[in-house]
Image (cartoon, helix red, strand yellow):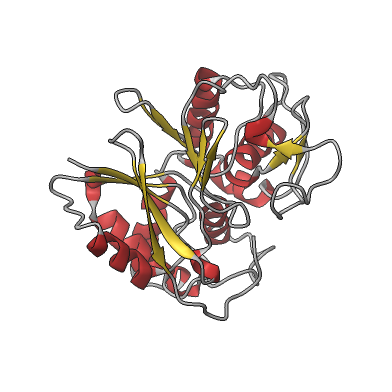
Amino acid sequence: MAVYAIGDVQGCYDELRRLLDALAFDPSADRVWFVGDLVNRGPHSAPVLRHVRALGDAATVVLGNHDMHLLAMSQGNLRKAGEGQLDDVLQAPDRDELIAWLRRRPFLHHDAALGWTMIHAGLPPQWDLAAAAACAREMEAVLQSEDFRAFAHGMYGNQPDKWSPKLDGLDRWRFITNCFTRLRFCAKDGTLNLKPKGPPGSQPKGFVPWFEVPERKTANTRILFGHWSTLGYQSTANAWSLDTGCLWGGSLTALRIDVDPPRPFHLPCAQLKRPGKD
């Protein structure tokens, strides 16, 4: 059995199919993990959702910021309706089934046997793996509860920007979601800066990539993440970055994680005219 982790797909259905074919992926024997952002800005979000959903237990998906954007729109929050291409999902005859399936995806996946943890974006330095997993479960419960619609309408925003166990309600949920789905840079004390989107070195003084914060509590945890196309593929500080900008004409990356060392595979993607970057 082979196990692969794949970077941000973002509606690039043709590239995803070509990558799985190139890997000779067999859903009856192999497993594939997706680091989130299955949808948005690429041309075929609905086919990507249908294909990954049809893989059943062979696929594991964590939620990314564009997946959350779709969920917010499904609940009537149109604040960012112009940022992307999601009509093929929202107007699909199977919309309700696709949205319900996406709502059941986790924010964090940990496989103790393989020794890997997967998220979409980042973790604040104050969380160890147990705390991160507990926060993920908390938000997964919100997505399945009667509070989901209220959260979907209060989800956007950059505050609060620092973790405290005393956070509650929408503030707490927003902070947790921002970490799992939007985080790139933070200060050594864990203060988030969610605005910079460029590569390391382009951020304001006092901030570093989340995985380079000294003494972060997940430093001994092998973490797979996406979200950061300007970072590209790299492994540093026990964190593997898998978003290689397929959406922008880069590549779609798969990392085989059941072997040592893990083995990357990059499928070149066509340059298309697509909406703005995030």
Is 254 above or below relative to 106?
below
Q: Which corner quadrant of the image does residue 72 belong to?
A: bottom right
Relative to 87, is 255 above or below? above
Towards the viewer: 187 or 268: 268
Q: Residue at x 31, y 56 (%)?
A: 52
Q: Position of residue 159 (x, y in %)?
A: 78, 40
* Image quarter (top left, top right, bottom left or bottom right) of the N terminus: top left
Quarter of the image for residue 25 reads: bottom left
- Lateral position of residue 58 relative to residue 125, left or right: left
Q: Quadrant of the C terminus?
A: bottom right
Instruction: Between residue 157 and residue 192, name the one nearer to us.
Output: 192
Q: Residue at x 55, y 70 (%)?
A: 248
Q: Left or right: where does residue 202 sit relative to residue 9? A: right
55 lies left or right of 138 = left
* Percent coordinates x, y for residue 6 in the rendering: 39, 51
Residue at screen point 29% across, 62% down: 51
